[in-house]
Image (spheres, rainbow, N blue to C red):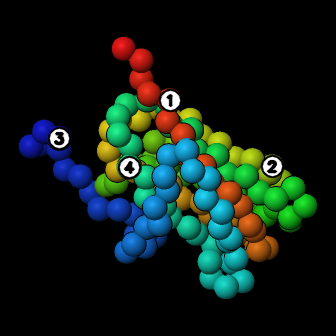
Amino acid sequence: MTPKERVGPPPRTAPRTLNALTLGEPREAVLDCARNECNQWYRLDIPGPGVLSVTVETETDAPRPMMRLVVREIGRDPVAQTMGGTASVLEVRPLVDRGLYMVLVQGGGARLPYTVTAKLEPERS
């Protein structure tokens, strides 16, 4: 970071603590808006530049309300985001640099079990 760059704070909707998401390790969770659990934020450490693949899969027999997936570097604008209605898989594949990122999985309506997975394809020299 150059001295003139100002890195802003995380978005207001981000919690004070973030659940860890480890590259290559699927993580299961549940969104349940009826219990005010519509957003889940994850912390993701990226060791170097490459293509980051973040996938959210829902159970095939579960009701699928509107979902949103956002990836952002801490203190910066989103690097990728997508929304889906009835799709059981959401995926983004942004180019990233080394750093700390946040992943938001957001849903509305019904209880929604899901699995989120992040993988990094390192930049080739």
- The extreme left residue here reads 3
Name which residue type carries label 2.
Answer: Ala
Numbered badge on residue 1: 3
Structural crowding at the residue carrying mark 1, measured as other residues with C-alpha within 10 Å and reported as few (<14), some (14–19) or many (≥20)? few
Q: Secondary structure at mark 4?
A: strand
Residue 105 x %, y %: 60, 60
- Return the residue at label 2: 87
Q: Is residue 29 left or right of residue 124?
A: right
Nearer the observer, 6 or 104? 104
Q: CA distance from mark 1 to mark 3?
A: 24 Å
Residue 114 x %, y %: 71, 61
What residue is rendered at 68% in x and 57% in y?
115
Name which residue type carries label 1.
Answer: Glu
Q: Secondary structure at mark 2?
A: loop
Residue 46 x %, y %: 38, 43
Numbered badge on residue 121: 1
- Which image quarter is the C terminus in? top left
- Which image quarter is the N terminus in? top left
Structural crowding at the residue carrying mark 3, measured as other residues with C-alpha within 10 Å and reported as few (<14), some (14–19) or many (≥20)? few
Q: Is residue 3 left or right of residue 9?
A: left
Q: Nearer the viewer, mark 1 or mark 2?
A: 1
Looking at the rendering, which quadrant does residue 17 occupy?
bottom left
Q: Nearer the viewer, mark 1 or mark 3?
A: 1
Q: CA distance from mark 3 to mark 2?
A: 38 Å
Numbered badge on residue 45: 4
Name which residue type carries label 4.
Answer: Asp
Q: CA distance from mark 1 to mark 2?
A: 25 Å
Looking at the rendering, which quadrant does residue 49 occupy?
top left
Q: Is residue 23 left or right of residue 32?
A: left
**Residue 9 visible to the viewer:** yes
Q: Secondary structure at mark 3?
A: loop
